[in-house]
Image: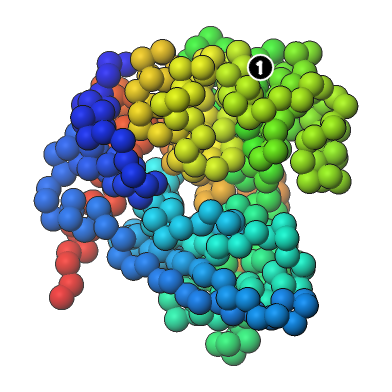
């Protein structure tokens, strides 16, 4: 595809200072591309609400420590706010704002009736006991109760949070409002109304997208080489499914570094080591390498499944993959996008690639509201159907506008959200 007008605008505006700046930059470039009217641009270019909360808890040693948490709500024009909660030392207000905007676009791309939200707490969960994490989670949930709910804002797991964290939020909400509400969070344990298939939904959605995309390049998973940066709840299922389908997983990594084997890794052995040790250091099934080295490996598909901003102008020229599928949120900066595009690398953008998680979250929400639950096979079948349809919609939009997939995906999403805003109007 030809270089897009959006890409030219991105380049002209220069590097962005924060993740939020980059998200807004992407939005305004898309608004220019589709000739979005000024009223939509004004409303959708801002977060509707950003809440900051102080979270004092008693540590195990008896000392009171105060953490800081956030919840950003970008848009609810198509439905309740929806988005994960992350626990990480580098959480910022600007990060959750940007991620909430991306969630709005992501939900619109797969056409589920949600808007975008995102939350986070500045902490290092690896240095906290289970009891401390429970107290922190319940305090955070208590502070958010005025703005969350099954028909208002529905949190889910994200970086360093899981089904247990969602169970604590669910219980705290129930104790405060005096009734159980299965739809208040998704990503819950199945025993508490969670959906089968939610735990691997994001990675599985990435895999389904690859099954659809690779034939465009006369490729298939069997025999193709995959590199995965990030080996958690998203990267591991992607690697596992790839290997099961006959593909070769050359390398995987965690935040402390990765491991490489030119003949293909034993994904299950690497996963067992990671679960036991918490990293991939000293794994005997391959050679150790840094994340920078991993990103530069020659492969068919590169799957960044860690944090945002990992592929930048500084390292994008080193990427030798034919296809990048963005399992993480915002892993590629706008400047890197231009370099990758110039080098002929096909990028499947985050708001499409990793939308499997929010899609199955939608399934869980629906099941909770109706108290009628589906079998795992049905969840997987419905997930594949939605992901394939979304890929076709994005690809068609890109061809219509003569732009790469990222601009096509955002253009499709912004158009859908803008249509909802116009139909609803502005009140008062």
Position of residue 350 measured from the top left corner of the image (x, y, whole percent): 47, 38
**Residue farthest to the bottom, as pictured:** 178
Position of residue 146 measured from the top left corner of the image (x, y, whole percent): 45, 81
* Residue 343 appears left or right of 174: left
How many numbered markers are drawn?
A: 1
Look at the picture and state if 316 lies above or below 119.
Answer: above
Residue density around tag 1, few if under 14, some if 14–19, many if 20 or more, within 10 Å: many
Position of residue 371 measured from the top left corner of the image (x, y, whole percent): 62, 70
**Residue farthest to the left, as pictured:** 38
- Residue occupying the point 57% across, 67% down: 185
Place residue 67 in its image quadrant: bottom right
Which residue matches tag 1?
225
Can you see residue 400? no
Which quadrant holds the C terminus?
bottom left
**Residue farthest to the top, as pictured:** 218
Can you see residue 185? yes
* Residue 148 appears left or right of 262: left
- Residue occupying the point 58% across, 75% down: 66
Which quadrant holds the N terminus?
top left
Q: How is the image coloured?
A: rainbow
* Residue 351 appears left or right of 185: left
Position of residue 89 measured from the top left corner of the image (x, y, whole percent): 58, 56
* Residue 91 appears left or right of 344: right
Q: Secondary structure at mark 1?
A: strand
Look at the picture and state if 163 lies above or below 287.
Answer: below
Considering depth in this image, is 112 or 67 the residue closer to the camera?
A: 67
Place residue 406 in its image quadrant: top left
- Residue occupying the point 13% across, 55% down: 39
């Amino acid at each position: 595809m030809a270089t897009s007008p959006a890409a030219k605008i991105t380049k002209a505006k220069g590097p962005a200072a924060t993740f939020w700046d980059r998200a807004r930059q992407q939005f305004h470039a898309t608004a220019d591309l589709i000739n979005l009217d000024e009223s939509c641009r004004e409303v959708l270019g801002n977060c509707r609400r950003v809440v900051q909360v102080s979270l004092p808890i008693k540590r195990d040693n008896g000392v009171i420590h105060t953490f800081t948490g956030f919840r950003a709500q970008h848009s609810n024009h198509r439905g309740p706010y929806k988005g994960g909660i992350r626990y990480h030392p580098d959480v910022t207000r600007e990060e959750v704002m940007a991620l909430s905007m991306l969630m709005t676009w992501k939900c619109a791309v797969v056409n589920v009736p949600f808007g975008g939200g995102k939350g986070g707490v500045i902490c290092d969960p690896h240095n906290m006991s289970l009891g401390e994490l429970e107290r922190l989670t319940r305090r955070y949930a208590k502070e958010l109760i005025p703005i969350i709910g099954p028909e208002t804002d529905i949190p889910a797991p994200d970086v360093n949070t899981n089904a247990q964290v969602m169970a604590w939020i669910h219980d705290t909400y129930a104790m405060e409002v005096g009734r159980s509400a299965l739809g208040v969070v998704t990503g819950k344990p199945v025993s508490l109304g969670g959906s089968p298939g939610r735990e691997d939904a994001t990675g599985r959605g990435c895999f389904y997208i690859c099954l659809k995309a690779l034939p465009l390049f006369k490729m298939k998973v069997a025999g193709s080489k995959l590199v995965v940066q990030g080996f958690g709840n998203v990267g591991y299922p992607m690697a596992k499914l790839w290997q099961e389908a006959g593909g070769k997983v050359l390398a995987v990594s965690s935040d402390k570094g990765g491991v490489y084997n030119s003949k293909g890794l034993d994904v299950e052995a690497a996963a067992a080591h990671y679960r036991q040790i918490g990293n991939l250091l000293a794994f005997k099934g391959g050679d150790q390498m840094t994340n920078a080295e991993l990103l530069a490996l020659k492969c068919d598909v590169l799957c960044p499944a860690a944090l945002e901003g990992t592929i930048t102008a500084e390292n994008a020229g080193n990427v030798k993959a034919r296809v990048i599928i963005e399992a993480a949120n915002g892993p590629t900066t706008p400047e890197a996008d231009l370099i990758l595009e110039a080098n002929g690398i096909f990028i499947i953008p985050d708001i499409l690639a990793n939308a499997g998680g929010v899609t199955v979250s939608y399934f869980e929400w629906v099941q909770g509201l109706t108290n009628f639950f589906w079998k795992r096979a049905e969840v997987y079948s419905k997930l594949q159907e939605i992901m394939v349809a979304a890929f076709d919609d994005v690809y068609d939009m890109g061809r219509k506008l003569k732009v790469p997939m990222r601009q096509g995906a955002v253009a499709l999403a912004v158009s859908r959200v803008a249509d909802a805003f116009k139909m609803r109007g502005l009140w008062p």
